[in-house]
Amino acid sequence: MIEELKMIYDEFKGSNDKSLKHLESELLKIRAGKASPSMLSGVMVDYYGSPTPLQQVANVNTMDARTLTVQPWEKSMLEEIMKAILHANLGFTPQDNGEVLIINIPPLTEERRRDLVKKAKAEGEHAKVGIRNHRKDAMDMVKSLKDEGLSEDMQKDAEDEIQNITNGFTKKVDELIDTKEKDIMTI
């Protein structure tokens, strides 16, 4: 029985780790006014007829805190990359100097910062919902072990352990959101 409970805990923690990793990747997409190559991670370029991630056809770097550069490996791709960035609707207008695309990241207004904080909090709430769903699944697995001879005390202890794990992951989500909020609101 103890092995089955340990397996349930491990599976529960693994599922919650995936939820946290997903939250982290979603938070990376929310820009905080500072230039970062990950801002263009979702851009798909039409590379000879097939949609290809921008990172596979060009080098994306930061010149300074407010400027990104995109240097294609083939100069003929400059126009396609520019179209893809504009089509991605990220609010960026790349400038073409013939060899490199230069993207100036505009400073965020106070209203836009508040909207981004709301978006970050919504992503955090999605992560918490995922954690709660994983908790329900784990609790159901523990209840199914009761039919196989799990004592009531062990079931209660297992449910307490699952709740403690849930609380730990929920706290991590809150910390990630607080950090992102400070990052967004810092000018």
Image (cartoon, helix red, strand yellow):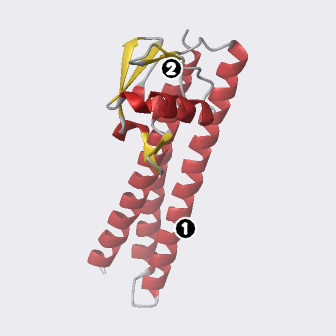
Q: Secondary structure at mark 1?
A: helix
Residue 123 seen: yes
Of 80 and 53, the residue lying toward us:
80
Residue at 43 percent across and 16 percent down: it is 98
Residue 166 position in % (x across, y down): 47, 54
Secondary structure at numbered mark 2: helix
128, above or below 175, in the image: below
Quadrant where the image shows the C terminus: top right
Image location (x, y in percent) of residue 117: 63, 28
- Is 149 situated left or right of 87 in this image? left
Residue plotted at (40% across, 90% down): 148
**Rendering coords of residue 35 (x, y %):** 46, 18
Residue under the image location 50 percent in, 34 percent down: 80
Relative height, residue 151 to residue 113 (above, below): below
Answer with left or right where residue 91 lies relative to residue 134.
right
As drawn, the residue found furthest toward the front would be 76
Tag shown at residue 136: 1
Marks 2,1: beta carbons within 8 A: no
Percent across and percent down for residue 47 are: 43, 44
The amino acid type of the residue labelled 2 equals Asp
Q: Which residue is mark 2?
A: 183
